[in-house]
Image (spheres, rainbow, N blue to C red):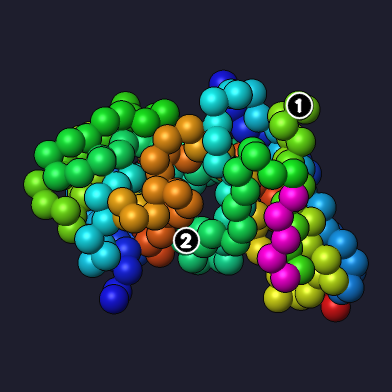
Amino acid sequence: NAGVTQTPKFQVLKTGQSMTLQCAQDMNHEYMSWYRQDPGMGLRLIHYSVGAGITDQGEVPNGYNVSRSTTEDFPLRLLSAAPSQTSVYFCASTGAGRASTYEQYFGPGTRLTVT
Amino acid sequence: QQQVKQSPQSLIVQKGGISIINCAYENTAFDYFPWYQQFPGKGPALLIAIRPDVSEKKEGRFTISFNKSAKQFSLHIMDSQPGDSATYFCAAATSYGKLTFGQGTILTVHP
């Protein structure tokens, strides 16, 4: 198993540009989520999905869109990049069978810089 | 509003010493309290977790102490090693996979 994979690893955008951060998992996990990590603020939930076709907002959803057409993939779209979106983005997944532990498996992250 | 507050922001410990990181939460609906460890350039990984029906959980050198009445929990790393140097996050969850994280603690263990 590759686990949770994210692409790209690094990205530089200009203000106003759009892009999609890719996330895929091969563990047949139902639950997937996106976090951003900023210094001194921990990880904050952006959007999450409890299964294909079902998504919901987290703590900091503004400026981001998500969709979940398959169990495996959960892309995060930046509609019009802003410098405030400079951050490290992590995708995570949790399997239905792990509900008793809520253990989340994190990808390696995407470091995004918006100039 | 930060629902999970973590301290200290950074911690320096000598090899063999005890590292202690504290967290406090506000939402009494939280029912799962994990600790994640993160090395530079990597995603966080689950280290140890506890549910509020127990006051302590130990796994090797890592122990979680949980005080439900005070709404506090802490991570103790016994016999700290240089390889433990990492960022540690406490977290709390009310439902399936939806974690609220603390701000993180950068731990440095000097040889």
Q: Position of residue A83 (x, y in %)?
A: 39, 37
In the displayed structure image, the side of residue A18 where residue A6 appears, left or right? right
Magenta highlight range: B56-60
Q: Which chain letter matches label 1?
A: B
Identify the residue shown where x is 22% and y is 61%: A28
Identify the residue shown where x is 47% and y is 40%: B99
Q: Mark 1 packing: few (<14 Cα in 10 Å), some, or many (20+)?
A: few
Position of residue B88 relative to residue A46, above or below, is below
What is the chief secondary structure element of the magenta stretch? strand
Which image quadrant: the C terminus of chain B? bottom right
Q: Which mark is residue B69?
A: 1
- Label 2 is placed on what type of residue? Gly
Q: Which residue is at the front of the view, A20 or A115?
A: A20
Residue B1 placement: quadrant:
top right
Dot 1 or dot 2: first in sequence order is: 2
Position of residue B2 relative to residue B78, above or below, is above
Residue B7 placement: quadrant:
top right
Does the stretch in magenta take in B65?
A: no
Q: Which residue is at the front of the view, A87 or A107?
A: A107
Q: Which chain letter matches label 2?
A: B
Q: Position of residue A26 (x, y in %)?
A: 23, 67
Q: Mark 2 packing: few (<14 Cα in 10 Å), some, or many (20+)?
A: many
Q: Which mark is residue B43?
A: 2
